[in-house]
Image (spheres, coloured by chain):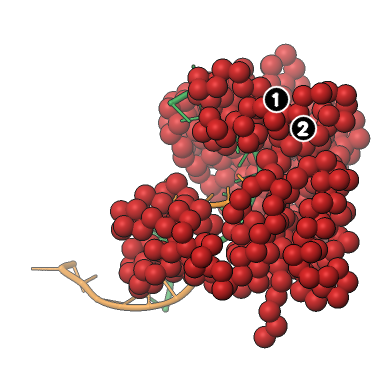
Chain colours: A red, B green, C orange
DNA sequence: TCTGGGGTCCTAGGACCC
DNA sequence: TCTGGGGTCCTAGGACCC
């Protein structure tokens, strides 16, 4: 079997770097990357968490996901900048255009991470290390931000290798380097070992990736089921998946959720939020050309208690009103009356929507479908506020709610 | 903890059927 | 019925990732 050469490219402090570059290009003299700074949500509407941090901010032990309130206690001079997802998408695309020159096989892993399959590409761009440095320098020079690149024979090792030391570095982590470079790392640095698994491993006396790698896999299987075997394989650098060009595996579900800027304490308001979320979910569903067989509603209370409820449709649908009726029913069935902080709507078990169209000879449904289509196209062209349901008039609520996109509907198809 | 939003995958338990 | 075993489907919840 041929040895593969895989690169993992990861933008350093992506959101923050991109914002910093944008500001420098627009005449600002301060580089956000040189001072304690973060990209953070809006605290007034209860979205106040850290989304990205500068390296100087890391000195204050600022963690992604932490509340802005908490980090300001430790770092009063912290600069907090709101997120701008349209800018991030532009930077992402600009980086992709450079990467495309180096390999035909690029897997987009997230907005700031890609894998590329460099196997056999050395005939064009030279040895892997040279090519990686070349890519890194070109991105820096042409786009203004830095990346880390990890090189190995599979995706897992390339990714862990790329994280070894940041920023602006190229690392290799080939199988023969595992014991020296990867095994000394804390076990929580392993892909797949998160907040819940790390303490469990610690309890078994496992603190490093090397200790995990040298634990009896049968013991791990007994303790952690199939997941135990998975992370044992990872700790030994065993991972075989291919770099899939274009990135994403087929989409499994579509959902939107929101933290509401006040605690909802009545069904009426809750239904309105659900409608606004359902509008976004269904629009995305239709854009993607799917119908859904399953809908789910999730609730987070003001005490951070979470629960959810789901139900199947008799026939798959992409109709906003049909799905909205179901989400209301789901909500009514499961809400226990506590004040609500966060609501979510999600559809899954997707199937193509073309055969459903044929079966919809009923004029009532045909009309609903036309209405959905018309509203979609108006909103795509003129933004979410072009058409909205009258219940939202003077309600203080957004008629369409979907995480990061807000007005940027044009962006949506490019994200999918 | 003054704690976001978008996803995927896995597991456990109950219902139901043979 | 003081009742077996196995398969499948469904639901809820938890864990992980960025």
Q: Nearer the viewer, residue A17 or A250?
A: A17
What quarter of the picture does the N terminus of chain A occupy?
Answer: bottom right
Q: Residue furthest top?
A: A394
Task: Give the letter of the chain under mark 1.
Answer: A
A372 is higher (above) or lower (below) than A109? above
The answer to whether any part of residue A274 appears in the image is no
The answer to whether any part of residue A145 appears in the image is yes
Q: CA distance from mark 2 to mark 1?
A: 8 Å
Would you say A170 lies left or right of A178 here? right
A15 is higher (above) or lower (below) than A150? above
Residue A250: % across, % down: 71, 61
The residue sitting at 67% across, 27% down in the picture is A35
Q: In what element is the residue under mark 1?
A: strand
Q: In what element is the residue under mark 2?
A: helix
**Disc sitting over residue A81 in the figure:** 1
Would you say A207 lies left or right of A370 here? left
In the rendered image, which quarter is residue A320 located in? Answer: top right
Q: Nearer the viewer, residue A78 or A191?
A: A78
Q: Residue furthest right?
A: A381
Q: Nearer the viewer, residue A22 or A365?
A: A22
Pointer 2 and pointer 1: residues touching (CB < 8 Å)? yes
Residue A373: % across, % down: 85, 42
**Disc sitting over residue A19 in the figure:** 2
Residue A127: % across, % down: 78, 70
Would you say A28 lies left or right of A8 here? right
Task: Give the letter of the chain under mark 2.
Answer: A
The residue sitting at 82% across, 51% down in the picture is A137
- Give the crowd class for mark 2: few <14, some 14-19, many >=20 residues within 10 Å: many
The residue sitting at 69% across, 30% down in the picture is A34
Residue A279: % across, % down: 73, 36
- Give the crowd class for mark 1: few <14, some 14-19, many >=20 residues within 10 Å: some
Give the mark nearest the N terminus, 2 or 1. 2
């Amino acid at each position: 079997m041929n040895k593969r050469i895989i690169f993992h490219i990861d933008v350093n402090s992506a959101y923050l770097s991109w914002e910093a570059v944008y500001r420098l290009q627009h005449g600002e003299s301060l580089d956000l990357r040189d001072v304690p700074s973060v990209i953070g949500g809006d605290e007034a509407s209860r979205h106040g968490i850290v989304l990205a941090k500068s390296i100087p901010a890391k000195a204050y032990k600022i963690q992604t996901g932490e509340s802005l309130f908490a980090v300001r206690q430790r770092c009063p001079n912290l600069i907090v900048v709101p997120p701008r997802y349209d800018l991030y998408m532009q930077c992402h695309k600009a980086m992709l255009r450079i990467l495309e020159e180096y390999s035909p096989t690029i897997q987009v892993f997230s907005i700031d991470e890609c894998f590329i399959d460099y196997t056999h590409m050395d005939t064009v761009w030279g040895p892997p290390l040279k090519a990686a440095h070349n890519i890194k320098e070109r991105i820096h020079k042409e786009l203004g931000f830095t990346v880390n690149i990890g090189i190995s024979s599979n995706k897992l090792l390339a990714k862990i290798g790329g994280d070894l030391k940041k920023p602006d570095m190229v690392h290799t982590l080939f199988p023969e380097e595992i014991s020296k470079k990867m095994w000394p790392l804390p076990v929580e640095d392993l892909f797949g070992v998160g907040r819940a698994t790390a303490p469990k491993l610690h309890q078994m006396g496992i603190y490093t990736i090397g200790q995990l790698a040298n634990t009896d896999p049968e013991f791990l299987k007994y303790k952690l089921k199939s997941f135990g075997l998975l992370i044992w394989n990872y700790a030994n650098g065993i991972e075989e998946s291919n770099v899939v060009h274009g990135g994403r595996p087929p989409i499994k579900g579509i959902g939107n959720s929101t933290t509401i800027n006040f605690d909802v304490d009545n069904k009426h308001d809750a239904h309105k939020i659900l409608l606004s979320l359902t509008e976004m979910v269904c629009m995305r569903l239709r854009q993607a050309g799917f119908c859904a067989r399953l809908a789910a509603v999730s609730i987070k209370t003001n005490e951070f208690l979470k629960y959810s409820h789901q139900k199947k449709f008799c026939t798959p649908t992409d109709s906003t009103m049909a799905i909205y009726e179901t989400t209301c029913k789901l909500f009514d069935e499961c809400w226990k009356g506590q004040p609500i902080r966060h609501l979510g709507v999600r559809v899954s078990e997707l199937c193509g929507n073309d055969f459903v169209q044929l079966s919809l000879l009923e004029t009532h449904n045909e009309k609903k479908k036309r209405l959905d289509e018309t509203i979609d196209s108006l909103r795509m062209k003129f933004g979410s506020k072009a058409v909205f349901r009258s219940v939202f008039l003077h309600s203080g609520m957004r008629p369409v709610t979907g995480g990061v996109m807000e007005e940027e509907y044009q962006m949506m198809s490019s994200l999918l």
